[in-house]
Every structure is written in structure tokens, then in C-alpha cells.
Image (cartoon, helix red, strand yellow):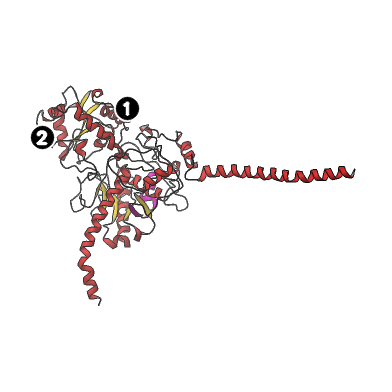
Amino acid sequence: MVLASQDFLMSEKSMKPSRLLFCLITISMFLLILSSVFLLQSTNNSFIPGSVFRLILANKTSIYLRPIDSSNSGNLPYLSSAPSLVDTRSPKSRIQDAACGGSNSNRKVGALGEWSGKACDPIRALLKVYMYDLPPEFHFGLLGWKGKGGQIWPDVSSPRLIPPYPGGLNLQHSMEYWLTLDLLASNTSGVVRPCSAIRVMNSSQADVIFVPFFSSLSYNRHSKLHGREKVSVNKMLQDKLVEFLMSRDEWKRLGGKDHLIVAHHPNSMLVARRKLGSAMFVLADFGRYRVEIANIKKDVIAPYRHVVRTTGGDSAPFERRPILVYFQGAIYRKDGGAIRQELYYLLKDEKDVHFAFGSVRGNGISRAGQGMASSKFCLNIAGDTPSSNRLFDAITSHCIPVIISDQIELPFEDVLDYSEFCIFVRASDALKKGLLLNLLRGIKQENWTKMWERLKEIVHHFEYQYPSQSGDSVEMIWEAVSHKISSIRFRLHRQNRFRRSQFMGRSK
């Protein structure tokens, strides 16, 4: 009995370490699984970040491909009308590439705007931007957005929370919307975008001061009097903006020269533009501006946001484009646009020419997109102003633009050589009978194809999207602004050569 008892005790002692080891292994496995789940959802280099899951749910789409249905583009501001390509590089590589900025005309459209926990590195940013915290009535309030508890800006971390911009022709002048979203995204964890511009909270650290006034939308929606109004909402907002800016130390410091104001619609900022003319404007052209208020020396020309659907990989080559020349739009214009009427009578009876009146009504945008995609050349003729959205609709349709507008200014012309993918014809030459058609019919298929291939290479420079992507319109505008700011700073520094020395002499 004694031996049996001893054997039992020895057996029990030997079992205790085994039980302890089993418990430790179980706990370790549990902690390992828990930490793995946590890492998959939180790390920047996870296989599928949690924010991507949220994007999939919001978009009802795949991880890599963005929908290209243009009918949704007016309601989903975070989608681009451009087709997306799968980027097989690691997230880390893509983030580093985006942070480095630098654009060139050969860069291709990137993959779906990636989501990560990293914010832009201010040290690598091309441009540091201070944005005024104007009340919502100047920006997203014009879209019907109402912040809660004094909230000034919408939450841009989730696409579902971003107020959509009105569709149709409103979209063509929506630049201030995309630029404002991009600055908000620069401080939002979870949104990966090029670090060409980053928002700073101290104006003394900024290269440029951004004024977030949705001036084109204000004109389109609120320039008419309603009811018993004696002053339109558009004019009231411009008056308030002038009063606000003139009172700011930031404006007084350089007389507004380092301020950036978007006034892309030719009739936007009509009341305020004279008083704020020292600022840098983002414009469509200079057609309705006096040279002392707006000029290529200080201002930036931005592309219209195209309204037709982007042509993807199914772009038709030369032999599958039966129409030689395409134009559809308003024919009877005033001033410089009178040439449209004269060209109409010269070309309307030609069998391989489509020259007709058109509007956005009755599915007009879709029909225009189909017509451009079936044409070899698309006419861009001056209208009431030198530029029009038609040029960018043609580019995105891979239809070689024929520009007949002697006073036109083109976006990003310091980077892009438009003669590689556009035909330029002086207005006086275009009106000579037979000259235009003889010129276009004489272009060989080989030469046309080279221009068509170049169009496909540069088309991504004319896309607005959220989040912004490397080389798109948003990044290209910021780069253009940085060039202007450098030029302004150069002139100011030269002016200070003797002023500072004189001041120091008087202080002795």
C-alpha cells in the first residue's frame, strides 16, 4: 500500500508540468491568433487593410478596379471616370513613390486610390498650403451639407460622408471641390494620395494660402435673385469674402500675392475679382479678364473636368473611326465664337463630317461621347470664351483635337507639348474654303496613329478624382501653383535687395 501511494504521488507530480505546458501552449496560440488579426487590420503593409474593406462595401466593387460608369460620376465624387490599372507593387513602394511628388508627361494612370494609416510626410511635400477655415456657406454648404456642432469640414475618411457635387455641366467647373478635398485628405489618416501638396495649420509655414470658396458653383446655383432678395447669394458671398480677406494679416503681408483663388467659370467672382486681382487665380482662360487682373505670368490654367465617359482599352484605331471630323454643340455664338457659324456652313454638307447643334438634354452627353469615340478628328472652336470643355472631352475620347482658337491658353503647357497630340489651325486659315478638310484628309494613318498613341499616354493628366492620384489634374495643378509661387518669390526677393539695406541703415 505504501509503495502504491508513492507511485501515485510520483505520477501526479509528473503530470503537473505537462498540464502547465499544455495551458501555456493554448494561451500562446490564442495570443498569436489575436495578434495576427490585429496586425491584418492595422498595419500599413497588411494584405487587405481594414479601410479597403470599408471602401469595397461603400463602392460595391472589387479591390483593384474602379467602376467606370459615367452615369454615377456626378453622385460619387470619390470615383474617377478613368479606367484603373492593377498596380502590382507593394503598398510601401507605392506610398514612397507618391510621397516623392514629381510629375512627368509619360506617367500612367495609377491603381485604385490606396488606403493606409500613413499621412503625407510634410518634409517631402512639394507645396505647403494653409487653408482658411471659412464657414460652410462658402464651400460644402453650397452643396447642401450641414456640419454638426459647428463642424466646418466634412469627414473625408469615408467616401460615403463626402457631399456629392452636382452632375451635368456643373461638373466641368468643379476644380475648387477637388482641390479642397485633396487638402482635407492630406491630414486624414487612411487616405493615400500624392504628397505634392499638404495642408499646414500655421500660415507662417505655408508656401501658399488657399481660399476655399466654391465660386463656380456659387455662380451656377446662386447668382439669380429669388423672392424678395435684393442681393443674390453669390454677390453676398463675394462681398463677405473680400471683407474677410482684406482684414487678414496673411493678406496684408504680401498684398494677397501668395493667395490662391479658384474662379474657373468665366462668370465667377465677377464682383470680387478686381479687388482680389493681386491673388493667384485658377482659371479656364483669360477671355473675360483684364490683363492686369489675370495673366499667364501669375495665374494657373486648369483643365475642365470632362463630362463624357473616358475611353478605356477599347479605344478605336484609325480604321474603326468612320467620321473624319466631329463637332456637336452650340453653333451660334457671339464675339470670337462667331467662327462656329461660318465653319458650319462650310462643312455641314460634307459626307464624312458631323457638324450639328447639340446640348446636354436628351442623353446629349452620351451621344457626344459616342460620336467623338467614332471620329478621327474633333473640332475645338472658340465660343463665347477661347476655351471650352469640348477639348477635354475629345482628349478623353482619344479623338485628335483640332484647335481653332487663336487666344486659347492650355493647361500644363510647360510640361505638355500639345503639338504631339493636337492640330492647331489659325481661325483665318480655317475659314478658307477647302483648307481645313484638305489638311485633315492629308494626314497619313501612320502620323494620326502616333498622335492617338500619345493621347492615350497623357490622358490621365486630365482626370479629376478622389483620392487624387499621381499625375492627375489635381496633382498637376498643385505643381503648376508651385512654379508660380517660385516665380513670385523670386520677384519679391529681387525687390527686397535694396529695401532691406536701406531699412537697416535708417535703424542705426
Q: Which residue is mark 2?
A: 429
Amino acid residing under circle 2: Asp
Q: CA distance from mark 1 to mark 2?
A: 34 Å
Q: Is residue 301 left or right of residue 160?
A: left
Q: Quadrant of the C terminus?
A: bottom left
Disc 1 element: loop
Give yes or no for residue 148 being in the magenta stretch: yes
Whether the residues at callouts 1 and 2 have beta carbons within 8 Å, the answer is no
Quadrant occupied by the N terminus: top right
Give the percent coordinates (x, y) of residue 453: 26, 32
Q: Residues within 10 Å of mark 1 (few under 14, many from 20)?
A: few
Which image quarter: residue 224? top left
Looking at the rendering, the stretch of residues picked out in magenta corresponds to: 124-152
Residue 191 visible in image:
yes
The kind of residue tagged 1 is Asp
Q: Would you identify the image quadrant in which residue 363 lies? A: top left
Reading the image, the residue beneath label 1 is: 314
Residue at 75% over, 45% down: 16
- Identify which residue, 64 or 265, lies in the foreground: 64
